[in-house]
Every structure is written in C-alpha cells, then in structure tokens.
Amino acid sequence: MRDRLLERPHVERDYVVVGATPEQLLALGYRPVGKDFPVFLHPETGEQYALARTERKTGPGYYGFATRFSPDVTLEEDLARRDLTVNAMAQTTTGEIVDPYGGRRDLEGRVLRHVSPAFVEDPLRVLRVARFAARFAPLGFTVASETMQLMRAIVASGELTALVPERVWVETERALGEVRPAEYFHVLRSCGALAAVFPEVDALFGVPQPPQWHPEIDTGLHSMQVLEVAAELSPDTSVRFAGLVHDVGKGLTPRDEWPRHLGHEESGAKLIERMSARLRIPNDHRELAVLVARHHARAHRVAEQRPGTVLDLLELTDAFRRPERFERFLLACEADARGRGPQLRAVPYTQGARLRAARRAAASVRLDPAILERNTGPAIAERLRSARIEAIRSLNQA
C-alpha cells in the first residue's frame, strides 16, 4: 500500500487473513511455509497469506517475541505490530483502504513515524528505519523526532548487542542497495547506533586528514561522500561497501600523529577482515574491500609510477584472472578520489583509464612458442613479466 500510494513500482502483494484458522486454509489447499507463525502460499498464485496476529516481547533481541494468532485478532491489531505508520496500511478486497494509524498522513508529510510505543521492543527496527530513510530520502522523507527518541532509547538499552550478525548485515546490504545509502549511516549515527553496530565507521568522524589532499578534512564525512559517489557509479553493493570502509584504518591513527595517517592502508585491511568475520560479511564484499583499502593509494599514483610498479599493482589485485573484480576495484578507487568535497566531485578519474589500458596491454602479451619450449617455469614467468612491462612502457610512450 505504501508503494502504491507513492506511485512506486511494487513486485508482490502480501495478504493478511482475518477471522480464519490454519486448518481452514489447509483445507482450501494453501501451503504452509511459516515456522514461527502461520504463513501460507496460495495454491494457484503462490502469493503469501498470513493469519492476523499480535506479538508480545518475551526476551532480548530480534527473536524474543511470543506470537498469538486466532480468528478474533483484528486487522487493526495486526497492523499495530508494524514498525512505521507508512507500513501499517492495508486494502480490503473491496478496495477500501484501512489506515488506523495515519500512514497516508505521514506519506503526504514525508515522515517516517513509529506506530506505537511497542516500537522499542524490537531493536532491528533501528536498522529498518535507517534503511527506509535511505530508500525514501530522495522523496524528502525524514525520521520523526519522537521516533528518533525511541531509537536512541533502544540504543541506550543495549538491545542492539542482541542482534545476530546476519540480520545486521542483511539490513545493511539492503541499505547499501538503496538510492541514498549514506543516509542509512547518517541516521544510525544520529541515534547513536553507528557506534554499536559499525564502530569502525563511527570512529572516523572527527578524525582530520591533510587539507591539501582532503578539503573536506573529516574522515567520516569523506567516507560518506565516497559512498555517495560509489552509489552514482555502480549499483553493486560490494563497490559501495568498499568505498565506505576504504579508510577505516585512519580511525586507528594515534591523535599525536594527526592529520597524517601513515600505514592506514594495511591497518585498514586488517580491520576490515575482523569486521567481516564479526558481521559474517560475504567473501566477495570482504575481498574487494580489503583490496581497495590496501591498494587505493597506489591506484591514485599510477601516473607517477614506473611500468614495473604498475604491473605489480595489476598482479596484486589479480587483475588478469579476475578482470570483473578489478573493474569494481577501479570504481571504488574513483569514488574515493572524487568523494572529497564538491570541488573534486566532477574531476575525471584518469587513473582508472590508465590502469584499464595497462591491464589490456599486459594481458595481450603472448610469448613466442620457441621461448616457451626452451625455458622452464620460473624463466618463462620472468620472460612474461618483462614482456608485460615493455607493453605497459610502450603504452605510456604512445
């Protein structure tokens, strides 16, 4: 209903069934799929039908709820357990809109507002609200002040620590795929949740960088700007995640060394490894993020490097065997270079073109069969390296 009223595309419809029992739906041929509460699939359309239910908090975390479903649970009671008013609307089979909690009003006012004080019972809602903020920020939506207060209360209660890592990552990856993913992290920081969920990112705010390279100064602000550019460059959430965390090593720099951050690339790569293990981040996201953290500075300096050093970077990033990942690496590096304030946002990232051309030139090298026949493995590898260096040198001279 939310998306329909906003005239946004929607791909599925979910139904709430009032005044029925599981036995009645089974008798009609509906297929059960719910484990914790009764959800069924329509025997012909496959659409999802859930019996109206209420929930009661019984323990900490996302799973600490007791569910009650029976024929006497009303639609209004079922809608009351939703997180936001814009998600607590329904439409009857006759076309009547049921909106007991002001969802249409908040759609028109562009407000994300909680349905009831029971909002605080589910810590996952902090992440969900932030994700919806990322989705609807282009339409002008903001989080209601009273809802933000409840989100701060959830953070203060320590309930976020009860969330399982997989749920945190699922919400975060969905947010990274939204139109304005940086808004997710801004909202989490506004309510104090960023420090609890992503302390590595939260630690970047307030950390200065050399102004001659970073006119935006603040590392946290830089990371958000990089994420914004990454979202413009690619829909791939691994590129966006790599842009977000490429500088997390700067959060480990001692204050007396600010604004310089010597060695932040390697310390950041190790920190991403630990973060990925904690949150069960998928390997493709982790691997790309580690590569970008470790090698983005080398990519930026490619115009100053000798051909052999350029080849080293191509080999370190496995550019010949994994060209698709290398392309994502370059996009994240471009986001880093352009995510440094409005002055640099529109500056072309010529380093990306240089490295793409160098990879193509080096990958096109083919050794003479006679050389392959006369030499052993190490000698062949050295011959191939020399030929690739020469191909990159010739490219630069041209």
Image (spheres, grey):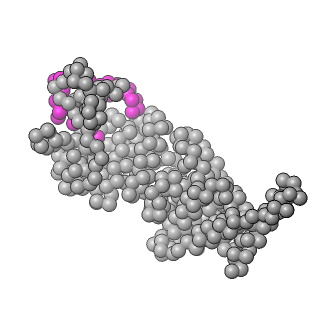
Q: Quadrant of residue 302?
A: bottom right
- Nearer-the-camera pick, 375 or 207: 375
* Residue 233 position in % (x across, y down): 47, 63
User: What is the span of residues highlighted in magenta in the rendered image?
Assistant: 55-83
- In the image: residue 359, left or right of residue 164: right
Q: Nearer the viewer, residue 333 or 358?
A: 358
Residue at 66 percent across and 65 percent down: it is 359
- Vertical placement of residue 359 versus 304, above or below: above
- Quadrant of the image occupied by residue 333: bottom right
Residue at the spot x=57%, y=61% of the render? 327
Does residue 384 appear in this view? Answer: yes
Label tally: 0
Q: Quadrant of the C terminus?
A: bottom right
Front position in the image: 371 or 201 = 371
Horizontal and vertical percent position of residue 330: 58, 63
- Is 70 magenta? The answer is yes
